[in-house]
Image (cartoon, rainbow, N blue to C red):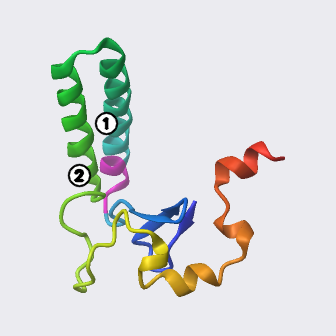
Amino acid sequence: MLETPDGRYIVVHGRLWRRHRPDLEPVRRDRLIRELMDARRAVRAAKRSGEAEALRSARDAVDAAKHGLGERGPVWWTDGTPDLNRRMIANTPYAEWYAGLPEAAKADPDRRKSSG
């Protein structure tokens, strides 16, 4: 996983995704991550079943877990820097840092695993 130097984002396929809050207690963070994974499984099951209410409920659970983790909602940093979540890194202040990385550092970890 490629993380920006300030630890605010991870980079996936050239796009920034906000990381979880670093100040979360490990027990709380782990609980929220379990809830997120459970909710994602519920989304998948609801899509398969075609149950609209179950899908809405599961998506709400995903959203709640992501808010708890700090990946959505108000930013968790306090220096006034705007949120760049979901932006292409080339269009952000991180562009120069990213461009200077070796190509191997930018490679999708899943792709690296399958090519070995």
Which residue is disc 1 drawn over? 35
**What's the magenta region?**
24-29
- Give the labeled residue for mark 2: 68
How far apart marks 1 and 2 lie (CA) works out to: 10 Å
Instruction: Say which quadrant the N terminus sits in.
Output: bottom right
Q: Do tag 1 and tag 2 residues touch (Cβ < 8 Å)?
A: yes
Q: Nearer the viewer, residue 51 or 26?
A: 51
> Which SS class for mark 1?
helix
Residue 61: x %, y % from top left: 22, 36
Within 10 Å of the Cα at label 1, are there few (<14), some (14-19), or many (20+) other Cα atoms?
some
Position of residue 76 measured from the top left corner of the image (x, y, whole percent) = 25, 70
Relative image position of residue 97 (x, y in whole percent): 56, 84
Taking the spot 35% from the left edge, 30% from the top edge, the residue there is 38
Residue drawn at x 38%, y 35% is: 37
Name the amino acid type tagged 1.
Glu
Please tell me whether residue 112 is drawn above or below residue 57 in the rendered image: below
Residue positioned most to the right? 116
Amino acid type, label 2: Gly
When the figure is inspected, residue 3 is found, relative to residue 30, above or below; the finding is: below
Total number of numbered discs in the rendering? 2
